[in-house]
Amino acid sequence: MKKKRSGSSRYFLFFVVLIALIYAGYIGINSLFTKLDLLKVKYVTISGNENLETDFLKNICNDFINLNLYSISKRDVLKKYENIVRIDDIKVSRIFPNKLKIVISEKRGEFHFLTENGNIFPIDKNRVVLDNVNFYENEALPVIGTNVPDTDIIIGQKIQNALIEKVFVLRDKFDSVDPDFINSISEFYLKGENLIFVNANIGYRIVFGNEEIEEKLKKLIFLEQNRTFEKGTTIDLRFKDQLVIRSEEI
């Protein structure tokens, strides 16, 4: 005596057939889209870049012109830009019928640092060393004077240095009082155990010491609002209840 096929079995078979038909339809439509001449790329648009030149970025993608829009994957685009250290992220969109849209996110320099041999490199917020082939106009960054050997520097890799870390930590403390203060500094360097800040506009020096940084910055702002300082002057804020203004370096 034959067993009757249960209702659940029939539904399962119907479901499998439906999935197979949908998949076959997807493959067919995808194959059709990747062969249509109508969908050949005629335009590549670049946006989001700040320092990197648009024409330079667009020329890298010239190989995509006249390729089918739907045959180009994000991986294809990423591969074109993988050696550009300044690029942080890329978003790729296909704009029907013939436009490839690429949105660039750049790594931004936070500081420059000076090496043992006197070379200057920018670093981003993650301490990644950026290339120094071009110094961009909108990246007039404070310089950290370090003793990092040039042989330790790899473009695109993080740099580990105690002084650089200290400056980043101090920058965060300054931001809680005056986010623009760091932009008024042209240089940081060590003199013995003291970190010296050099004012960008006039050239006077500032020494904060290691304690109560936020309160000392408030005191400095008050001083700058109420008197002027000459180039070469040192404002020494290391002492809790005493302000020392010197005409020479400490």
Image: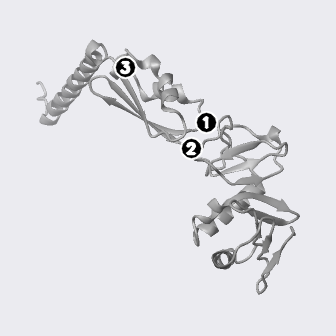
For the N terminus, the image quarter is: top left
Q: Is residue 231 above or below residue 91?
A: below
Residue 183 place in picture, x, y as percent: 62, 59
Q: Nearer the viewer, mark 1 or mark 3?
A: 1
Mark 1 surroundings within 10 Å by alpha-carbon count, few (fewer than 14), some (14 through 19), many (20 or more): some
Determine which of the numbered discs, if any, sits on residue 53 in the image: none
Residue sitting at x 63%, y 68%:
174
**Which residue type does callout 2 highlight?**
Lys
**Which residue type does callout 1 highlight?**
Val
| Label 2 residue SS | loop
Residue sitting at x 53%, y 41%:
106
Labels 2 & 1 near each other (Cβ < 8 A) = yes
Q: Which residue is mark 1?
A: 85
Image side of residue 244 versus residue 89, left or right: right
Residue 90 place in picture, x, y as percent: 47, 36
Image side of residue 233 versus residue 85, left or right: right
| Label 3 residue SS | helix
Residue 218 place in picture, x, y as percent: 64, 77
Q: Which residue is mark 2?
A: 107
